[in-house]
Amino acid sequence: MALTWSESADSRSNLGMSSIIQENIITPAASDYPTGGYPMYAGSGSAPNNAGQQWGFGALRGVIAIGFTGTAINYIWHYNKTTSKLQVFGISVATAGATIYTLTEVAASTDLSGGTVSLLGWGF
């Protein structure tokens, strides 16, 4: 997996006891989307194979996609707290001849390159 992970400058804010928010920017590489989504880690200790994918928190409470560039705008980016993964969904027509749309998770190895996603993480 070649997801590039960087913390936005001066983005970490302490909101009081046990509450921190931080903005990070991810840049997907060509065909790197793993089955079930990109793993999200609270801190580097829980990311043995992807130490760059981390928030620097003791615990990760939630992640919200807040900004997009390039091709990333064409997808819906959703943090699944149960699996601790950032999932990517596309919109498709559910039935022929009808204007009914559904969200479908993109397939593994989908090329999501060509853009960035700004994520706001909440943890402590």
Image (tube, rainbow, N blue to C red):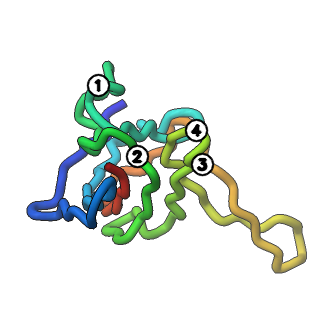
The image's mark for residue 60 is 2
Q: In the image as oriented, which residue stretches furthest toward the left?
A: 9
Q: Position of residue 115 (x, y in %)?
A: 31, 60
Using residue 117 as the reference point, say whether residue 75 is left or right of it.
right
* Mark 1 neighbour density, 10 Å: few (under 14) some (14–19) many (20 or more): few
Residue at mark 4 to residue at mark 2: CA–CA distance: 12 Å
- At numbered mark 1, what does the secondary structure look like: helix, strand or loop? helix
- At numbered mark 2, what does the secondary structure look like: helix, strand or loop? strand
Q: Is residue 114 visible?
A: no
Q: Which residue is mark 4?
A: 83
Q: Earlier in the sequence, mark 1 or mark 2?
A: 1
Q: Earlier in the sequence, mark 1 or mark 4?
A: 1
**Is the residue under label 4 in contact with that under label 1 (CB below 8 Å)?**
no
Residue at mark 4 to residue at mark 3: CA–CA distance: 16 Å
Residue at mark 1 to residue at mark 2: CA–CA distance: 13 Å
Q: Kindly identify the amino acid type of the residue bearing the numbered disc 4.
A: Thr
* Mark 3 neighbour density, 10 Å: few (under 14) some (14–19) many (20 or more): many
The image's mark for residue 106 is 3
Q: Kindly identify the amino acid type of the residue bearing the numbered disc 1.
A: Gly
- At numbered mark 3, what does the secondary structure look like: helix, strand or loop? loop
Using residue 94 as the reference point, say whether residue 90 is left or right of it.
left
Q: Position of residue 80 (x, y in %)?
A: 57, 49
Q: Earlier in the sequence, mark 2 or mark 3?
A: 2
Quarter of the image where one finds residue 58: top left
Quarter of the image where one finds residue 9: bottom left
Q: Which residue is mark 1?
A: 45
Residue appearing at x 53%, y 57% in the figure: 78
Q: Position of residue 16 (x, y in %)?
A: 27, 64
Q: Earlier in the sequence, mark 4 or mark 2?
A: 2
Q: Position of residue 102 (x, y in %)?
A: 75, 65
Q: Kindly identify the amino acid type of the residue bearing the numbered disc 2.
A: Leu
Using residue 53 as the reference point, say whether residue 96 is left or right of it.
right
